[in-house]
C-alpha cells in the first residue's frame, strides 16, 4: 500500500476554509470525523516539519505501521517535543475520545448525546489575554482568561476545533525543519 502523502502546513492552511464549511454543514458524524482527521493531518504536518528531511520521517508517520501514525501518538509526541502546550494536548485527546464514541456506536449518535455532550463541555476553551478593571479602586488584573463559549454543543465543538486547527497551523508555519548534523548521512 502506497503511503498517504502528508500535506505541508501551508497546504492545510490554504484548505482550512473548506474545513470550516464542513464543520458548519455536515452531519454531526461527518463534522466529528472530518475535524479529527484534519487535526491528525495538522499534527502530522507539524511533526514532519520538525523532523529532519528524510524518508524515515515519512515512514514514522505512515499509517498503519509507523510508530507515529496514530492520532494519539502524534499529539503525545508533539507535546513531549515541546511543540504544543498541555491544554491543546488535552483537547486533542478529548476530540479523539469524541471521535471514538461516534466510531463505536452502531446507531446514529449526535453531539447532543449525553456522553458526547459531556466530552464537548470538557474541552478547554481558547484563552484570550486581556486586562480587567476590578473594584472601586480601579485596580487591574491582567492575564489569560478563558473565552466564554455560547451556543449549541456543536457550536462549542466547532469553536474549539477551529481554534485548535489555527494553533497547530500557526505553530507549524513558525517551525523550521531541523537540519541533519554534519557527517550524519
Image (cartoon, helix red, strand yellow):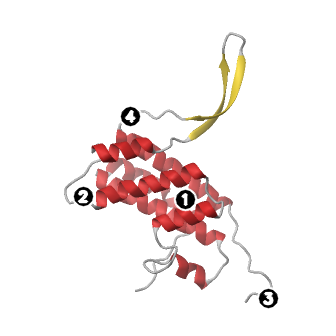
Judged from this view, the residue extending furthest toward the top is 136
Identify the residue under disc 4.
151
The CA distance from mark 3 to mark 1 is 35 Å
Identify the residue under disc 2.
105
Q: In this view, does 110 lie to the left or right of 153?
A: left
Task: Please tell me which residue lies in front, 17 or 78.
Answer: 78
Q: Mark 1: few, some, or many residues within 10 Å (few <14, many ≥20)?
A: some
The CA distance from mark 3 to mark 2 is 52 Å
Earlier residue among tags 4 and 3 = 4
Q: Are marks 4 and 3 in contact (CB under 8 Å)?
A: no
Identify the residue under disc 3.
183
Q: What secondary structure is found at the residue carrying circle 4?
A: loop
Earlier residue among tags 4 and 2 = 2
Q: In this view, does 10 lie to the left or right of 121?
A: right
The CA distance from mark 2 to mark 1 is 32 Å
Single out the mark in the foreground, 2 or 1.
2
Q: Is residue 165 visible?
A: no
Labelled disc at residue 13: 1
Single out the mark in the foreground, 4 or 3.
3
Earlier residue among tags 3 and 2 = 2
Q: What secondary structure is found at the residue carrying circle 1?
A: helix
The CA distance from mark 4 to mark 2 is 25 Å
Earlier residue among tags 1 and 4 = 1
The CA distance from mark 1 to mark 4 is 26 Å
Q: What secondary structure is found at the residue carrying circle 2?
A: loop
Q: Do the residues labelled 3 and 1 touch (CB within 8 Å)?
A: no
Point out residue 182 in the picture as x, y percentages from the top left corner.
Answer: 80, 84
Q: Mark 4: few, some, or many residues within 10 Å (few <14, many ≥20)?
A: few
Amino acid at each position: 500500500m502506497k503511503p498517504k502523502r502528508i500535506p505541508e502546513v501551508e497546504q492545510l492552511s490554504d484548505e482550512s476554509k473548506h474545513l470550516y464549511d464542513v464543520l458548519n454543514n455536515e452531519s454531526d458524524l461527518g463534522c466529528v470525523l472530518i475535524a479529527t482527521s484534519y487535526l491528525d493531518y495538522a499534527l502530522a504536518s507539524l511533526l514532519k516539519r520538525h523532523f529532519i528531511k528524510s524518508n524515515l520521517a515519512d515512514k514514522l508517520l505512515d499509517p498503519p505501521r509507523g510508530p507515529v501514525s496514530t492520532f494519539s501518538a502524534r499529539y503525545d509526541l508533539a507535546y513531549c517535543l515541546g511543540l504544543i502546550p498541555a491544554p491543546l494536548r488535552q483537547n486533542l485527546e478529548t476530540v479523539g475520545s469524541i471521535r471514538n464514541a461516534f466510531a463505536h456506536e452502531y446507531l446514529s449518535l449526535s453531539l447532543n448525546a449525553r456522553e458526547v455532550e459531556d466530552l464537548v463541555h470538557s474541552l478547554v476553551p481558547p484563552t484570550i489575554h486581556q486586562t480587567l478593571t476590578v473594584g472601586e479602586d480601579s485596580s487591574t488584573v491582567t492575564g489569560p482568561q478563558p473565552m466564554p463559549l455560547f451556543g449549541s454543543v456543536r457550536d462549542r465543538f466547532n469553536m474549539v476545533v477551529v481554534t485548535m486547527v489555527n494553533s497547530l497551523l500557526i505553530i507549524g508555519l513558525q517551525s523550521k525543519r531541523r537540519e541533519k548534523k554534519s557527517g550524519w548521512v
